[in-house]
Structure formats: C-alpha cells, structure tokens
Amino acid sequence: MNSPSTPRRLEPRTLSRAQVEQTAERHRTWGRWGPDDELGAANYLTADLVAKAAQLVRRGAVFSLSLPMDRSGPQTGVNGRVNPQHIMLKHGGDILAVPPEVGELRATDDAVYLPLQSSTQWDALAHMFYDGHTYNGRGPETVTSQGAQFNSITNLRDRAVGRGVLLDIPRWLGREWLDPGEAIQAEDLAECARAQGSEVGEGDFVLVRTGQITQRRSVGSWGDYAGGPAPGLGVSAADFLCQRRVAAIATDTWGVEALPYESGELRAPLHIILLINAGVYLGELWDLDALADDCAADGTYEFFLVAVPLSITGAVGSPVNPIAIK
C-alpha cells in the first residue's frame, strides 16, 4: 500500500446545524422504495450481489470481528449500557452436590443480561430520531415499550450478507492508530481505497479501521473508549458512502463518528445523515485488527461478510458476531 510521504493528522471540520441538515437532505432516501419501506440501504443488497460476494472466498480464512461479550468490555453504564452479565443457572457444582444415579444424564445451563448495544453491534434504523422523525419519516410513537413497530433490526436478519471492504486508515497513513478527535473525510476514504487498490460499490459493507482498539490494547485499559474523545468518520464521509450506495458502515469505535462531533450545535450529526435520512446501517465496536493484518499481508481488502443480527422482535439494535471470510 502506498502511504502519504509524510504522516499527517486528519483534522476535523466545523459545521453548522444548517450544513448538516443540507447534507442529510441531499442523501435522504425516504420514499425511494415506497412509503412502507423499512429496509433502507439494505434494498441495495440483491441476490446477484450476494452470489458475487460469495465468490470472494478463496482461502477459507475466517475472521470473527466481535469483541468478547463479557464483563471486561468497555461499557461504563451510561444510558444503561453495561457490559454483558453472564450467569450460570446450573453449573458443575450443582451436579457434584447430588451424587448421580448410575447412567444419569445431567446438564449445565446459563443466561445473560445483555443490553443489545453493549458490545459489537448493529444500530437499527429506528435507533435515532431527529426533529421527531426516524427513517422514512416515521415518528417516535412507532417505538413503544414493546419495541419498534417499524425499522427494527430484524429487517436485517436475512440481509446482512454480502461483500465487505476494509479501509485501513492508519495503515494507509503509515501509523499504528489515529488519535482521539481525528476525523476521516470523504477524500481520505477515497485516497485510502485507491492506495489499497479497493473499489467501494453498491450494496457493500464498508469497514473502516481507526486503530482505536489497537491503541486501547496497547495500554491495557478501555479508559473512556465508550463515549470519550475518539477518532472516527467526519460528516463529509457521507458523500463518499452515499454516492456509492453502500448498505452499511462499521468501525472499531464506540460511535462511528469522530468525537468531539464536528458540529457543536448537534449531537451525532453523521447518525442523522446516514441512519435517519439515508437508511445506511451503522456497526459499532467491531474488532478489525486481525482482519486488517491479513488484508495487509495478502494485499486483498475485500471478503465475504456474514453479520446477521439476532432476530429479537422490535429491537432497535442487536449484538452480532460478524464473520469475514477470504
């Protein structure tokens, strides 16, 4: 991969509310697939594209892109998001407590308390609202105490399969990781793709590595990974992604976009543009390190991706164990 001659910092931009709203309106797909549509950009995922993506499997190398779902994760309890709590309902001690009859069969069993966005996960289109609307113009009354009536993550349960493309930003820049606050712009994505020899196209799942998980591993602590200053996508990244009609974007960060946000007037401006208006799914807390090393080793940054959410009726997000196959 050809890196810039001088390693550089990716500076964030300063945007007004009006500028973000103009970008959101430019990329809005409400009504494109009809007034009842709940799939958003997943509509781009045709059977032909899935079949073509399956042909990318050549070596049979398999990579799990999920963080361990356990109590040692990055969550701090903000907004009720705690790390997964795994408990045993029956364990070996229960078996040992009562001597078994000859030939008796006994079992272990377990359970988990799992906020659906506590680890590697997808955001559903119903996850965010802006000015009282989520994707395709639906209002907050469509998400009740029973869950989302429309735009639930279950719409993705048979769609989250296709061509994945990794854009390894720090490796392209000749660095180990990006620093908190750095913002990856549309031109950075384009230049990285060009340097890798990668093309991003319709129906693709674009995985953007910032190296933040690498950095946290190097210090041995999650610190303020969950919600603190972070590298990520800048607002202009929407132009690169939406023009190419991608299905989804996932990163190795807590919230996809650069923190602090590029607009001081708005929270999560890129969520407003991509999730609410363009219907592009967002994946967060994906572990891309091992896949990135393999892509760099063989020079191939495309692969078959299977990232199916749990089919939890009405859920506005879902844990996922994404699998990249090369």
Image (cartoon, rainbow, N blue to C red):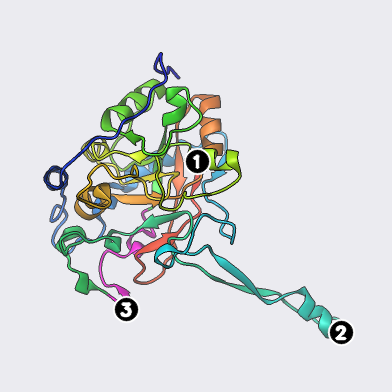
User: Residue at horizontal 48%, vertical 36%?
Assistant: 211
Q: Between residue 142 and residue 160, name the one nearer to us.
A: 142
Query: Amino acid under label 2?
Result: Pro
Which residue bears the numbered disc 2?
A: 99
Is 250 within the magenta? no
Q: What's drawn in magenta, residue-wise?
A: 144-159
Q: Which mark is residue 288?
A: 1
User: Residue at horizontal 49%, vertical 64%?
Assistant: 82
User: Residue at horizontal 39%, vertical 60%?
Assistant: 157
- Give the structural element (helix, strand or loop) at label 1: loop
**Circle 1 Cα neighbour tier, 10 Å, few/some/many (<14 / 14–19 / ≥20):** many
Q: Position of residue 310 (x, y in %)?
A: 44, 63
Q: Between residue 51 and residue 257, name the one nearer to us.
A: 257
Q: Position of residue 155 (x, y in %)?
A: 32, 62
Which quadrant is the N terminus positioned in?
top left
Q: CA distance from mark 1 to mark 2?
A: 47 Å
Q: Are marks 1 and 2 in contact (CB under 8 Å)?
A: no
**Vertical arrangement, residue 268 with respect to residue 165, above or below:** below
Q: Between residue 111 and residue 160, name the one nearer to us.
A: 111
Q: Position of residue 94 (x, y in %)?
A: 77, 80
Q: CA distance from mark 3 to mark 2?
A: 46 Å
- Give the structural element (helix, strand or loop) at label 3: loop
Which residue bears the numbered disc 3?
A: 145
Query: Amino acid under label 3?
Result: Ser
Q: Between residue 271 and residue 34, name the one nearer to us.
A: 271
